[in-house]
Amino acid sequence: MARKGRPRKTSERPKARAPKTRSAASDPSPPETRQKATGFGFVALLSFLAGMTDAIGYLRAGDFLSFMSGNTTRLAIAIGEARGDAVLRLGAILAVFVAGNAAGVVVVRQTGERQWPLLMVVTLVTSGVAAFAGANSSPFSLLPLVFAMGMLNAAVDNVAGHPVGLTYVTGALSRFGKGLGRFLCGERKPGFLVQMFPWVGMLAGAVTGVLLLHAFDEAAIWGIGGLALVLTAISLAIPRRWMWTSFGLGKPGA
């Protein structure tokens, strides 16, 4: 009888397993990370501009130019004390700020969801105030700055889904505090930390505004227009396809 031969050894080696890859949702690509960093950095700069404007306006005219919560409380006090001049002035500031917000949205929508046209208008308005307000500016002469700060809020809707405010920080501090509370309760989501960008920006801007005013007096307003111009140039350099992730403007992937 013929022997059964042993099975031949094959030289084929088992195929190596392909390395596991993370999904795009759990592992953001470097470009997306850069877009988010750009958004949060730009938010800090815009809030810096708002803080600087608010400090200069308050020290020069005694009114907030971007902090409408404070002006609302002051309006209520003026109504309660029947001070008609203060009611008229503060009511005008609130109305102009709301109008500036509406105008900002219109400008952004009509210019293809870009920031630079909006920031250019802010630059022109603030520079005009610096040129014509004069040394003894009244609160009414600074109303264009209030309008510009209202417009500024349309420059950013959100950053990567995180809502942010530019010319006010009450909401930012509230969202930070609630996020901190959830973190202490075991929800390990550090997203609330991004709310510090506008707060730090506004604080630093306000300090800078005080220093500029002490150093240059009424000429400090030129610093507002100069910074707005710098931000316009930065916005021009940001790729259009980044607008959605960085600022919540335009359509995703456009």
Image: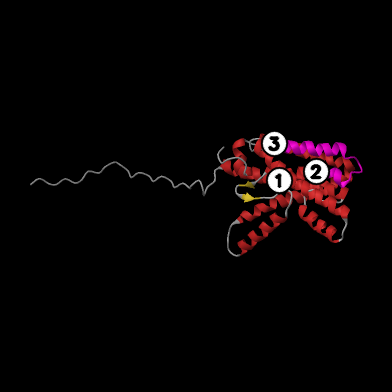
Question: Which residue occupies 77% across, 37% down?
Answer: 123
Using the image as rendered, state which of residue 37 and residue 93 is in the foreground.
93
Callouts 2 and 1 close, C-beta under 8 Å = no
Left or right: residue 218 versus residue 195 is right
For the residue marked with disc 3, what is the amino acid?
A: Trp
Question: Which residue occupies 72% across, 41% down?
Answer: 103
Q: Is residue 12 visible?
A: yes
For the residue marked with disc 2, what is the amino acid?
A: Leu
Residue at the spot of label 3: 116
Mark 3 residue crowding within 10 angstroms, few (<14) / some (14–19) / many (20+): many
Left or right: residue 109 versus residue 226 is left
Residue at the spot of label 2: 145
Q: Is 132 drawn above or below residue 196 in the view shown?
A: above
Mark 1 residue crowding within 10 angstroms, few (<14) / some (14–19) / many (20+): many
Residue 175 rendering spot, x and y as whole percentages = 66, 57
- The residues bearing labels 2 and 1 have C-alpha atoms spaced at a distance of 13 Å
Earlier residue among tags 3 and 2: 3
Using the image as rendered, state which of residue 74 and residue 91 is in the foreground.
91
Question: Which residue occupies 80% across, 43% down?
Answer: 145
* Residue 136 covered by magenta stretch: yes
Earlier residue among tags 1 and 3: 3
Residue at the spot of label 1: 153
Q: Is residue 63 visible?
A: no
Using the image as rendered, state which of residue 169 and residue 140 is in the foreground.
140
Q: Farthest residue to the right: give it.
A: 136
- The residues bearing labels 1 and 3 have C-alpha atoms spaced at a distance of 13 Å
In this rendering, which labeled residue sits more in front, label 3 or label 2?
A: 2
Earlier residue among tags 2 and 1: 2
- The residues bearing labels 3 and 2 have C-alpha atoms spaced at a distance of 18 Å
Q: Farthest residue to the bottom: give it.
A: 185
Magenta residues span: 117-144
